[in-house]
Image: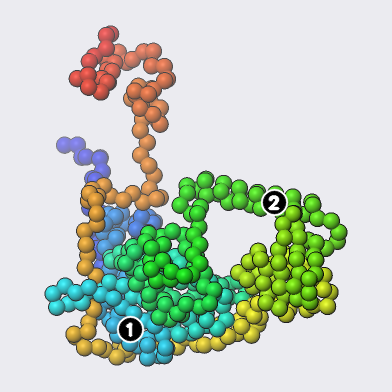
Amino acid sequence: MESHSCTRSNKCGNKHATKGWIADVVTDKLKSDGDVGCSELRKWLMKTYNVDVPYMRVYKGKELAYADMYGNWEDSFIKIDDFREELRKRNAGSVVEIDFETKGDKKHFLRIFISLAACFKGFLAGCRPYIGLDACHLKGKFNGVLAAATSIDGNNGMFPVAYAVLESENTNSWTWFLESLKKAIGTPNGLVISSDMQKGLEIAITQVYPDVEHRECELRYKPVLDLLDGIREKLMERFDKKKRIVNKWKGPLVPSTRKSGDNRAEVKCKEKRWEVILDERKCSCRVWQVKGLPCVHAAAFIAFTREANWETYVDLYYTVDKFKEAYALEIAPMPGKDQWEHMGVADKIYPPIIKRPPGRPRKNRIIPADEPKKRHRCPRCGIYGHHERTCKNPAPLSTPEGSHETSTSKRGRGKNTKARE
């Protein structure tokens, strides 16, 4: 009897490579690179241990490794109330809010807001009254979004003011976030809020901060080519506008200036006029008031006076003293989870209620980005990349002896028919 030379298909992988074994061997790799995907881990296992493991087993092993490193998902929500109290105790004055929904006699986590005292007090003391809002989606067993409110310090660096974990981007969650933010910072004079048109955010800002300036990014949701081309058009228009302006200027100074007093002047440029008031640090173009730095019209008047000191007309937010005030307070360190003061059982917060997402359930698996796409081969000409119906290549001139060419029927024409020999 002849022995079989064909190989066995191993769809289940190595039975000894359990999810527990996978968790043990990938732990160090996940610690160094936590963003590695399951497909990449599967290739790494094959290369390192010569073991072919199914995708879902790698996924379960990765989840088990994360649980060993960082703890259980459910336990993290149960301890979140302890985390809030420890944070408040060690960072006095911080605003930490937790919202939940009740089901039966249990409180289920919904959202959390955190604004440390060092952050919002530093913002009020040393940063311009500007807040940028944005959010990104979280990955894990329980979905959600990470929202943040940031400002700009005197050195044009990002300054964190507050952050939160929300269930999703909607009007209710953004309204709750802004109401919590208002408890921390109030309504600073001249506050400006910038966002990129997140879902429900515009309505929430109107409800919580009806009197503040709100600006939105108009290019963000365009396709990438339209986005890049829109930025290019804006730059082109700006450069062309400035070039046409400067070509009409006469004399060594920037625009023409007419002094009407020691601190007031009328600045004329390109048939337009702007009023500059030095002692109030104002210009009718409003650039000086918004940025805190003298605009081109104010700069022309300051240069015209000759005796003025430039530093006296720069906003205090750009000074070293204000920068120090922004970062003056410290954020207290936290002990380990086992050292937190535990709350009563009645105050425990349980994991979020998993709700069925809208729409039809997905049946096909999510294809990883690094997985090669299947290529279709035309049965008529044998070339990849197109179907037989759209094939424009010439048909083979001859066929092997004893064989018949078979043509595929068009849609709706019934069964395939044999071509004439």
Q: Position of residue 369 (x, y in %)?
A: 39, 50
Amino acid type indicated by mark 2:
Lys
**In this rendering, which labeled residue sits more in front, label 1 or label 2?**
2
Q: Dividing the picture into quarters, in which one does residue 154 lie?
A: bottom right
Instruction: State whether residue 159 is above or below residue 403.
Output: below
Q: What amino acid is found at the position of numbered circle 1 in the picture?
A: Phe
Q: Is residue 317 left or right of residue 350?
A: right
- Image quadrant holding the C terminus, namely top left
| Disc number for residue 293 | none
Q: Residue furthest right?
A: 251
Secondary structure category for the residue under label 2: helix
Residue 176 horizontal/vertical position (percent): 34, 72
Q: As rendered, which of 120 and 79 lies closer to the eye?
A: 120
Question: Can you identify the residue that label 1 sits on?
Answer: 83
Q: CA distance from mark 1 to mark 2?
A: 54 Å
Q: Is residue 348 left or right of residue 314?
A: left
Q: Is residue 74 left or right of residue 42?
A: left
Disc number at residue 241?
Answer: 2
Is the Cβ of the residue at disc 1 closer than 8 Å to that at disc 2? no
Q: What residue is at 41 percent from the left and 74 percent from the top?
A: 163
Residue at image location 35% in from the left, 39% down from the top: 374
